[in-house]
Image (cartoon, rainbow, N blue to C red):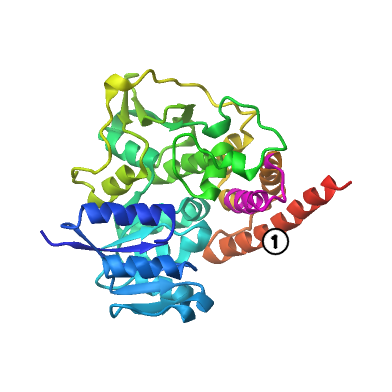
Amino acid sequence: MTKKNVVILGSSGYIGNATLDVISHLADRFTVYGLSVHQNITLLSHQVRKFRPKVVAITDPTRASKFTPIHGVKVLKGTEGLIELATLPEVDIVVVAVSGTNGLHPTLHAIKAGKSIRIANKETLVGYGELIMPLVHQHNVSFLPIDSEHTGLYQLLSYKDSLKRLILTASGGIFHNRPIEADISPADVLKHPRWQMGKLITVYSSLMINKGMEVIEAHYLFGVGFDQIDVVIHPEAIIHAMVEFIDNSIIAQLSIPDMRLAIQYALTYPERCTAKVKQLDLTKLTGLHFYPPDDKKFPALRIAYEVGTLKRGYPLVYVVSAEEATKAFLANKLRFTDIPRVITTMVQSYHPPSTINLDTLQEVEHQTRHRTTNVIEDIIASYRD
């Protein structure tokens, strides 16, 4: 079997590290050809020693200048280096695990270069999906999500012609059965009961922002209308996705909550391999529970349906305002309950450009970041009044 060369964009984050763990388990199938980080050159040095990639990219120029190449690794710098890494002719699979919309340009270039894309970068797909998916179809590339819910749906959709609806599950985060209050701290929110994730995604999950993004992702990935995508709260996080067919039968995908399963499925698709993840023992489950999401408690989920339907840059405004508000909360500046307030304000005040293309959407992103910062500063100032 010929090994496939894998590049991991964002190897210092949770998904990046988990992908390396999966590749270690499947070393007879995959080779780590390239890695990228933004600033964490200490971890990158450790990864280079262990996996011996041919090329690395460091997007922060200052940190790049301080990195000492080892084992003959080639070092690329900046966004241009990230794009070069994602399009190297030797590369078969590009795992996009960078944060925010920083994954946009390497993803676009990798698609045009005909690479197989495995995307864990929700913000890029949600914000720019109306440009990305037509490009995927135009270049006929393999494009799979690294996400427990969407990989679950991929496994279930063998009879798409008979599809009635997709059902995404959500653990509900730490607040599914607790009130959401203004004095909640970042430390409170970062105690997710089921999943290990980065800080931004953990906050998103606690407010169902993450699930809202996944609804929009499902629309782009599977080409179904928003009226065919439902969300249910499932606190145990054992069932990751369900599909209901026109005969009202439902099939589900179950596993323990471990992102390495989703990563492995995406890497080995359409094959399956044995995993190092613990087996699910059905006899030890005490119950599986399902509840409808509370729209009043989690308004960001409802807003996601609205912006996804509107398109024309609205999903990008949702993504950017959520990111900026969450960062302000994690910096102990903005109250937890004001994160949805910021998103609502930005979406309601947005006026889409007459033409939607890469240039206009990037301008939307730029202007939204600037305007969101101003809205956040006004809200913070009101705390002192």
Q: Position of residue 135 (x, y in %)?
A: 39, 59
| x then y, percent, for residue 80 | 45, 76
Task: Determine the secondary structure under disc 1.
Answer: helix
Q: Nearer the viewer, residue 114 or 324?
A: 324
Q: Nearer the viewer, residue 240 or 189?
A: 189
Left or right: residue 301 compared with residue 111: right
Q: Residue at x 44, y 39 (%)?
A: 195
* Mark 1, other Cα within 10 Å: few <14 / some 14–19 / many ≥20: few
Q: Is residue 328 magenta?
A: yes
Give the quadrant of residue 185.
Answer: top right
Instruction: Return the residue nearer the eye: 159 or 316.
Output: 316
The stretch in magenta equals 317-336
Residue 272 left/right relative to 357:
left
Q: Is residue 64 visible?
A: yes
Q: Is residue 65 within the magenta segment?
A: no
Disc 1 target residue: 370
Taking the image as drawn, is residue 119 in sight?
A: no
**Residue 192 on image: x %, y %:** 51, 38
